[in-house]
Image (spheres, grey):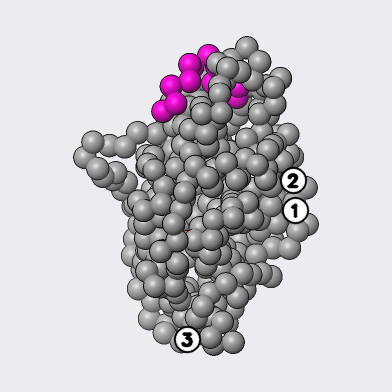
């Protein structure tokens, strides 16, 4: 793979934490909690994507054999969000939330000691139920908005990536992402009880990914970081829920996402082996920013806001929940860390990113298998694939 000119330059200055994420203390709770996502009144959000579209005159299909194989697989693994899912399923959202509470009582992660002295201490079952319902509406809304982010990013990759095999594959991902937005949106409209705007921190990250002019940053931000985390989060929800429509929907989406993450690793692998240390450090900083934003978004700021929980209580509660000790939050990085290792980003620049991930408590995942080894994961969940096999 040849390096594009857009990869070089501008990497000679290392930035401070404040310059990377906008605050000096990674764990500054008030800063994390006070940033709440709101939808623009216009109903639209615009970001200058600053990209240069690139034609290639090298049309030789299969020059990048692994990407070509992935493209061929993607064509046969398509499914139809309208006809391949059991939309006739009746969903009683409150019953689903109560069943989740019952099978995973620790799911909310709140012990009596954590609630002490806050208004949540006096919450009845009714309020906890509402909290569960709002949390589900919020989670699925974030999935939907994240999928739209993936749709826009992948369309950008079609334009900017220099290789024909990657343009072909990315075009299939555009269709996949459109379908994902479609099914999450329909599920929210027909089966749940409300929408939420895009979380503020996730919004900052999506804006930064789209605004970066370098095509490899789109991949790193979206395919490696956002989709890596999404795949783990979908897997967790797939395991948790007994609601058959959502379970099947997630299964199909995960089969697509496994290819998407593999696409990211396969595309960046060789390129990153040729970058200089300062260039790699810039990628490390971007991966770190993404990791922090995705962790910050898990505080579900918009739910507390809508539930009108007093600000002091939110700060107290969140102060008692340490993301470095939270198994669920740590598990979400299980796909990301081995992939960054495969790309050489953990240990470049004197192990700068390894150090950051050690501080975040997620480094232990580095030796799990990376996503090039499981691009076919969950593929038996697709009806089309089953018929072909
Ligand atoms: Fe997706
Ligand atoms: Fe995806």
Helix, strand or loop status at disc 2: helix
- The answer to which of marks 1 and 3 sits earlier in the sequence is 3
Label 1, residues with CA under 10 Å away: few <14, some 14-19, many ≥20: many
Q: Please name the residue that numbered disc 1 is placed on.
A: 366
* Magenta-colored span: 306-318
What residue is rendered at 45% in x and 41% in y?
138
Report how far apart the C-alphas of labels 1 and 2 lie in the structure: 6 Å
Work out whether 35 lies above or below 216.
above
Residue 242 placement (x, y as % from top left): 59, 55
Residue under numbered circle 2: 363
Q: Are marks 1 and 2 in contact (CB under 8 Å)?
A: yes
The nearer-to-camera label among 2 and 3 is 2
134 to 184, vertically: above or below: above
Residue 278 visible (yes or no): no
> Left or right: where does residue 89 sit relative to residue 298?
left
Disc 1 secondary structure class: helix
> Would you say the beta carbon of the disc 2 residue lies within 8 angstroms of ligand 2?
no
Query: How far apart in space, not on screen, are marks 1 and 3 (Cα)?
Result: 34 Å
Q: Is residue 78 visible?
A: yes
Q: Is residue 217 above or below residue 78?
A: above
**Front-most of 336 and 325?**
325
Q: Quadrant of the N terminus?
A: bottom right
**The image quarter in which residue 164 lies:** bottom left
Where in the figure is residue 40, as x and y percent of width and height?
A: 27, 37
Tell me what residue is drawn at x 42 percent, y 82 percent.
Answer: 58
Q: Mark 3 sits on what residue?
A: 61
- Element under label 3? loop
């Amino acid at each position: 793979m040849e390096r594009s000119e857009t990869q070089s330059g501008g990497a000679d200055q290392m930035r401070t934490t404040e310059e990377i994420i906008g605050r000096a203390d990674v764990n500054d709770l008030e800063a994390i909690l006070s940033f709440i996502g709101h939808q623009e009144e216009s109903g639209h959000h615009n970001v200058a994507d600053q990209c240069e579209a690139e034609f290639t005159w090298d049309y030789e299909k299969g020059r990048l054999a692994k990407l070509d194989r992935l493209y061929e697989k993607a064509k046969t693994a398509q499914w139809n969000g309208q006809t391949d899912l059991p939309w006739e399923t009746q969903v009683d959202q409150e019953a689903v939330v109560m069943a989740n509470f019952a099978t995973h009582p620790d799911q909310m992660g709140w012990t009596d000691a954590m609630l002490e002295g806050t208004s949540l201490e006096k919450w009845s079952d009714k309020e906890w139920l509402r909290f569960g319902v709002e949390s589900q509406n919020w989670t699925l809304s974030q999935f939907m908005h994240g999928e739209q982010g993936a749709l826009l990013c992948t369309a950008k990759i079609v334009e900017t990536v220099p290789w024909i095999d990657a343009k072909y594959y990315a075009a299939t991902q555009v269709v996949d992402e459109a379908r994902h937005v479609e099914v999450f949106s329909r599920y929210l409209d027909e089966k749940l009880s409300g929408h939420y705007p895009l979380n503020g921190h996730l919004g900052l990250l999506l804006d930064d990914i789209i605004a970066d002019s370098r095509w490899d940053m789109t991949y790193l931000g979206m395919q490696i970081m956002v989709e890596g985390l999404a795949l783990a989060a979908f897997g967790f929800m797939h395991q948790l829920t007994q609601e058959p429509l959502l379970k099947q929907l997630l299964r199909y989406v995960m089969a697509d996402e496994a290819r998407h993450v593999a696409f990211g690793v396969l595309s960046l692998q060789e390129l990153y082996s040729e970058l200089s240390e300062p260039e790699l450090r810039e990628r490390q900083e971007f991966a770190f920013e993404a990791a922090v934003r995705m962790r910050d978004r898990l505080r579900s700021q918009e739910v507390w806001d809508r539930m009108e929980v007093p600000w002091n209580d939110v700060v107290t509660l969140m102060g008692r929940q340490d993301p470095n000790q939270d198994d669920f939050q740590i598990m979400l990085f299980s796909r990301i860390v081995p992939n960054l290792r495969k790309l050489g980003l953990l240990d470049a620049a004197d192990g700068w990113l390894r150090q950051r991930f050690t501080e975040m408590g997620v480094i232990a995942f580095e030796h799990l298998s990376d996503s090039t080894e499981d691009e076919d994961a969950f593929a038996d969940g697709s009806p089309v694939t089953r018929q072909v096999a």
